[in-house]
Image (cartoon, rainbow, N blue to C red):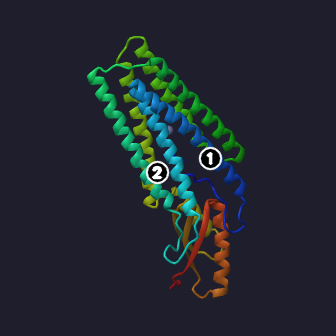
């Protein structure tokens, strides 16, 4: 999500709309199943963490559960964003997902702070860890759970060619490493090294901070209307390549999953409305080709200054 969060695979274009209903359904099912699997894994880890007093396990459980909350936020944002536009919200409610993303970022940072404080406290107070065998089993469950989820997302992601699911699969694969960290800490404790668990807890905390950072950057970029530069450049080049367009200037922004491009094109001021309209269709088609993510394109004709 964490680009999860940005479940933002190309969703087809308005003109000549690509039918992706089935692929969306498959992607949603994969995300729902994975979230369920991770929720079970995280809850089991959390219960065992409370019983054993293992902070490594606690951090890993919080991390897995915050990943579930990310999926939930994406899902809710998705549901809300499907509501039709109305007079009060003329652009629809698509940015509900970004709002949810903000909440997710807060949850992740809060769990990092909590796991960090608990680990630090345990390191200083030399507290022990109980029921180490149960702890080791739970950490192994964390590895297996994340690995299964990673493989499943990768398989579906490859089948429907969803970049989001594939990168999400990589995320789960890395999360298995986090569980492995908790496992190593507990094994160290089993071998008589008391500090093994709090050190693992601090390592897992750093891992959560990294995820929190990525989610925060991603959400901030979306809230600040950031796009990839290549989209603006490609749209301008595509528009300028149409005969009759002297110069083009593009603005692009995401509203939820919809990429909107506004394009100003300088045209012959004596052009009839009919011809300007035709030109705008050609510009839109060229931009759809050059920027497949573009959903809504607004063409604004500007009068080219006449040569003196
Ligand atoms: Zn994660």
- In the displayed structure, 304 sits above or below 148; it is below
Per the image, label 2 sits on a secondary structure element best described as helix
Distance in Å between CA atoms under marks 2 and 1: 16 Å
Q: Which residue is mark 2?
A: 218
Along the line of sight, which residue is nearer the eye, 170 or 242?
A: 170
Looking at the image, residue 229 lies above or below residue 131: below
In x, y percent, where is residue 20? 70, 57
- The residue wearing badge 1 is 163
Please tell me which residue lies in front, 283 or 199.
199
SS class of the residue under badge 1?
helix
Q: Are there few (<14), some (14-19), or many (20+) residues within 10 Å of tag 1?
A: some
Q: Position of residue 294 (x, y in %)?
A: 61, 63
Residue 240 seen anywhere in this rendered image of the structure: no
Residue at far left of view? 124
Q: Residue 35 falls in which quadrant of the image?
A: top right
- Which residue is drawn at the image coordinates 67% and 75% (left, top)? 281
In the orientation shown, which residue stands out farthest toward the top?
191
Instruction: Judge left or right: residue 101 versus residue 295.
Output: left
Which disc, if any, is residue 298?
A: none
């Amino acid at each position: 999500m964490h680009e999860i969060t940005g479940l933002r695979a190309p969703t087809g274009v308005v003109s000549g709309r690509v039918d992706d209903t089935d692929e969306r359904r498959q992607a949603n099912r994969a995300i729902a199943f994975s979230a369920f699997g991770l929720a079970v894994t995280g809850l089991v880890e959390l219960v065992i963490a409370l019983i054993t007093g293992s902070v490594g396990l606690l951090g890993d459980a919080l991390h897995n559960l915050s990943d579930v909350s990310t999926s939930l936020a994406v899902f809710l944002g998705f549901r809300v964003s499907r509501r039709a536009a109305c007079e009060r919200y003329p652009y629809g409610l698509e940015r509900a997902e970004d709002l949810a993303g903000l909440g997710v970022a807060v949850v992740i940072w809060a769990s990092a702070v909590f796991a960090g404080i608990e680990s630090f406290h345990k390191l200083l107070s030399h507290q022990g860890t109980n029921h180490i065998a149960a702890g080791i089993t739970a950490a192994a469950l964390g590895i297996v759970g994340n690995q299964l989820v990673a493989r499943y997302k990768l398989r579906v992601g490859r089948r429907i060619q969803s970049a989001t699911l594939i990168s999400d699969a990589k995320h789960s694969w890395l999360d298995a490493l986090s569980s492995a960290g908790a496992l190593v800490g507990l094994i160290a404790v089993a071998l008589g090294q008391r500090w093994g668990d709090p050190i693992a807890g601090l390592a897992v905390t750093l891992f959560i901070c990294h995820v929190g950072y990525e989610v925060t950057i991603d959400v901030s970029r979306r809230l600040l209307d950031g796009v990839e530069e290549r989209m603006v450049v490609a749209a301008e080049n595509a528009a300028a390549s149409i005969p009759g367009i002297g110069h083009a200037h593009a603005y692009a922004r995401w509203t939820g999953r919809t990429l909107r491009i506004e394009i100003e094109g300088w045209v012959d001021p004596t052009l009839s409305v009919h011809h300007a309209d035709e030109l705008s269709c050609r510009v839109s088609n060229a931009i759809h080709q050059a920027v497949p993510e573009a959903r809504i394109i607004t063409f604004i004709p500007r009068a080219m200054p006449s040569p003196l």
